[in-house]
Image: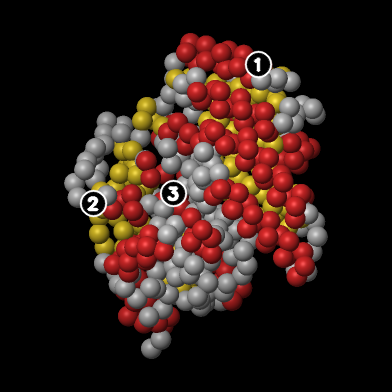
Amino acid sequence: MDIYERLTRELGPRRVVRDEEALETYARDESLLGRYMPDAAVLAASAEEVAVVLRVAAEAGVPVTPRGTGTGKTGGALPVRGGIVLSTERMQAIRRIDGDDLVAVVEPGVILGDLQNAVEAQGLFYAPDPASLSMCSLGGNVAANAGGPRAFKYGVTRDWVLGLEVALMGGERLFFGRRTQKGVTGYDLVAGFVGSEGTLGVATEITVKLIGKPEATGLLLAVMPDAVVAGRAINALLRQGARPRAVELLDRITLAHVRPHAPYKLPEDAGAAVLVELDGEAEAVARQLERQGLLFASFGANDVLVARDDQDRERIWQTRRMASRSLTAAHKFKLSEDIVVPLSRIPEAFERLYAVGARHGVTIAAYGHAGDGNLHVNVLSDEDAQDPAVRTRIDAAIDDVFRETLALGGTLSGEHGIGIAKARFMPWEQSAGVLDLQKRVKQAFDPKGLMNPGKIFP
C-alpha cells in the first residue's frame, strides 16, 4: 500500500486530494515564482489529522509542505520537492477570546481579519495587520512572522504569540510557550518557531495576546515633493520621540499606478505620500496630528490632510493596500522584495534604488513601512521576462537591490521571509557559521529534512 492509500484509509477520501486539476491550486502561491505540482494535498481539519500526515510521511520518507491560504510572497508554500501539501485552511475555529486574561486561542486556518473583527467586537485589539489581512491565515502569519503597517508601534506577529501547539515531522505533538502575559522559563521555542517558514513543523493551535482597543485613531496624509524629502521628514518625526502606530510612504511611481482606481483620490502633484496613523486618547491624538502636520509642512509638503472620520480613514488605507496589485496589473513582470534599512538611511535608499533601475533598464517602485525602515521594492518591466537577455538584466537589478540594502547596513527581509525567492542571498548577509547553526537547529526538529525542504537555505 503506498502512502496516499494509507492516508486515504486513515483520514478518509475527502481529506486527500489527488485529482490533477484540483491540485493546481496547491502548485502555486501569491509569490508568482512558478508552478510546482505536488503528488497530493491533504486538507487537514484537526491537529490529530495533521499529526497523522506527518507520521505517515516520515515513515515513507515523503516531503511535506505546509500551506495556509497561499498569500506568501517568497514561495514558502510551494512544494518544490513534490510530495504532500499539508493545508490547514479548514482549521478555522476561534476557540476562545478571553477579555479578562487578554488572550485568544485560534486554529491556524483562521483568517486574520476575522480574528480582528471578533476581538474588536469585544472592545479588544490584536495589532498585526499585513495588507493581505482579509485573506491570510494566522498559521501563515506565524510561519512568516508577518508584520504590517502597525508593526512600527506594536511589533510583528512574534511579539503577539504567547504559545503554540505544534506537530513535528514524525507526528509528535508539543506545546511551546505559555498562556500568561509574561514568562521566561527555558529556551524561547515560540520565538524560534515563529518565522521558521514551516521548516520546523506545523502550528496546530495559536495563543495570542490581546490589548484593549484604543479609544481614538487619527490619520494624517502628507503630500511630499518626492520620496527622498519624505524620508528626511520621517527621520525628523521619529527623532521628536513621536510613536505613531503606522508610518507609511508611497513614492511617485506607486502613486501613479494607484491613483486611477483609488477610493481616495490623491493629488496629481504628489511626488510621494506619507501616511501617519496615531491612536490613544482622543485629545492627545488631535494634538499630535497638528504637531506632525506642521513638521511635514516645514519639509515642503504640498498639502497636509487629516482624515475627517473613520470612513475617510478607511478609504485612505484601502488606497494604500492597492499598491501591490496596481503595480502587478500594469506590468508584464513584477517582483516585490521587502528590504529593511536603518532609519537614517531611508532617503539614501531611495536614491540608490532608483539608480539601480536606471542602471539595468527596469523601473523601480517603492513603498512601505517607513517608520521601521521596511520598504517594499518592486522591480517592474514591460519586456518579455522569458527573453534571456531581459531576464539577465532583471536578475542583475534584483541582485543590486540586495547589494545596496546590505551596503546600507540593512537586511534581506522585514516580514515576507526568505522562502525560495531569497535563499541564494542568505550568504550575503549571514556567515557560514550562522547558517550552519540554523541548519543544525532544523535537523534537531526534522532529522530527515522532509519538512518544507528547499526553503530559506541556499
Looking at this view, is 401 or 303 the one in front?
Answer: 401
Looking at the image, is mark 3 or mark 1 earlier in the sequence?
Answer: 3
Q: Badge 2: how crowded within 10 Å, few (<14), some, or many (20+)?
A: few
Q: Is residue 205 depicted above or below 437 in this figure? A: above
Task: Name the residue carrying label 2.
Answer: 187
Q: Badge 3: how crowded within 10 Å, few (<14), some, or many (20+)?
A: many
Distance Cα–Cα, label 3 vs label 1:
37 Å
Distance Cα–Cα, label 3 vs label 2:
18 Å
Q: Is residue 181 depicted above or below 213 in this figure? A: below
Task: Name the residue carrying label 3.
Answer: 145
Of badges 2 and 1, nearer the viewer stands: 1
Task: Name the residue carrying label 1.
Answer: 298
Three-letter code, disc 2: Tyr
Instruction: Please tell me how many numbered marks the rendered image carries.
Output: 3
Three-letter code, disc 1: Ser
Q: Secondary structure at mark 2?
A: loop
